[in-house]
Amino acid sequence: MCDIYASTDPSLYESVARSVRIGGVVTSIKVERRFWQILEGIAADGDLSLAQFLTQLHDEVIERRGELGNFASLLRVVCATFLDQKNKSIK
């Protein structure tokens, strides 16, 4: 069962830091390469650049909750949620 997961290309789970401008402030976000790929796909699906998508997500979370917490963790959960929704639409 784990062969499909154990054979994952190590470059996909390498942590990659990117500098992005959110709300006029440059910050660094570090997530695994595969998550960056998924986030780029989510942004493209919304006709947004990655920076635009991250800014919009950041701003909407602040608007709803007043605080953000761990943005990198949120991005990983966003990716999982996106993939879950995508799988549900296929079934």
Image (cartoon, rainbow, N blue to C red):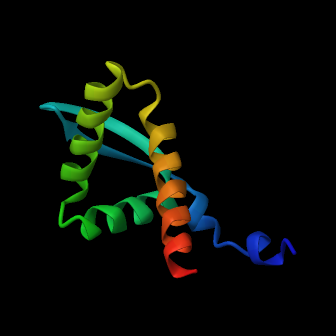
Residue occupying the point 49% across, 71% down? 86
Task: For the C terminus, give its image quadrant.
Answer: bottom right
Left or right placement of residue 23 versus residue 11 in this view: left
Residue occupying the point 26% across, 36% down? 60
Query: Is residue 80 or residue 22 the one in the foreground?
Result: 80
Number of numbered discs present?
0
Q: Where's residue 62, x and y in %?
A: 29, 26
Residue at the limit of the structure toward the right, as seen here: 1
Residue at the limit of the structure toward the left, as seen here: 24
Task: For the N terminus, give its image quadrant.
Answer: bottom right
Image height of 90 relative to 81, above or below: below
Q: Where's residue 20, x and y in %?
A: 25, 43
Q: Where's residue 23, x and y in %?
A: 16, 32
Residue occupying the point 19% across, 60% down? 49
Q: Which quadrant of the figure has residue 56?
A: top left
Residue at the limit of the structure toward the top, as seen here: 66
Q: Which quadrant of the figure has residue 61?
A: top left
Query: Is residue 73 or residue 32 the one in the foreground?
Result: 73
Q: Where's residue 51, x and y in %?
A: 21, 50
